[in-house]
Image (tube, helix red, strand yellow):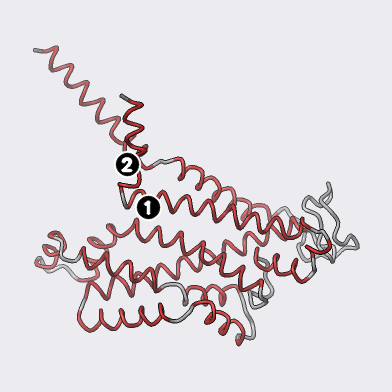
Amino acid sequence: MSELLLESSTISVHDSTDGPRKSIRRYLSPKLVVGATIVIVTVLFGVIVPFFAQDPTAVSNIGLAPPSAEHLFGTTQTGQDVFAQLAYGTRGSLLIGILVGALVLVLSAFFGIVGSFVGGFLDEAFSLISNVMLIIPGLPLMIVIGTYAPQKSVFLVAFVLAFTGWAAGARVLRGQTLSLRNRDYVLAARVSGEKTWRIICVEILPNLLPVMSSGFVFSIIFAILGEAGLSFIGIGSTGSLTWGTMLANAQNGQALLLGGWWWFAPPGLFIAVFGCGLALINFSIDEVIDPRLRAPRVKKLQRKTS
């Protein structure tokens, strides 16, 4: 009898210790590892390297020089170091992406969660505003606002991108909140007299975190690509370096015709690779939201372990 008790206790301890590991391993997919590695390396490059790089605006006599030991990524048409511009441009693009992601997250959560939970006239008004913003084409609106703004700073570009891109996320969060507000634990909180803001923060938001995090990652991708598009057509941020302004300057300097591939290839490659990393993270979050997407991988792991 004592041997049986000892054996059962060891099994229970083994299960309790392996439980958190299995739960972590369940969400730690190869997509998440690769995507997070790409994003972390890019962020570290944009945060640390500018402190050691040259002045990106310094002009020299070595115009459109290929990569060398002195200039790792060559120089522009006016002799500016491309590597230094890439370092500062990475910081500028990341700043725009984070600002837009945060603004979109706040606006979509406010119009999507608060209105649908309160209901009534507020829900109808917020839903009408979201539908109007969905109907208005985003790119022409960005072009109009960017054209008439005299000084287009990074913060203005971020505001324009967030203003034109929050409505879709608000519609998704509204639908999710409508399905959550009639759950038993939410109704119990209402009956017990809990305040509305506390029910939203404690009962509703934790269940919407996967959807909101996926929307945040997608907003960063949208912001970086949108800023690059605006800069490429000449209405991007002025007085600051981003990946988009580097591509625009390379286009204006006819880098492609002059064979200066080192001028436009690094920012374009950084946009593609960073967007790929964020997309992989977004796919991993989708697998957490919908377990059916990771069902084949879980079955493979079970077969290997068995």
Residue 25 falls in which quadrant of the image?
top left
Marked residue nearer the N-terminal end (1 or 2): 1
Residue 68's place in the image compared with 92, above or below, is: above
Q: Which quadrant would the C terminus be assigned to in this image? A: top left
Asked if residue 229 lies left or right of residue 193, the reply is right
Number of marks present in the image shown: 2
Residue 154's place in the image compared with 292, above or below, is: below
Which of the two marks, 1 or 2, is nearer to us in this view? Answer: 2
Q: Secondary structure at mark 2?
A: helix
In the picture as drawn, the residue positioned furthest to the right comes out as 61
The residue lying at 78 percent from left, 50 percent from top is 72
- Residue 244 badge: none
The residue lying at 70 percent from left, 69 percent from top is 248
- Residue 295 badge: 2
Q: Secondary structure at mark 1?
A: helix
Kindly identify which residue carries mark 1. Answer: 286
The residue lying at 81 percent from left, 52 percent from top is 71
Q: Amino acid at mark 2?
A: Ala
Residue 11's place in the image compared with 113, above or below, is: above
Q: Are marks 1 and 2 in contact (CB under 8 Å)?
A: no
Q: Amino acid at mark 1?
A: Asp
Asked if residue 195 lies left or right of residue 210, the reply is left
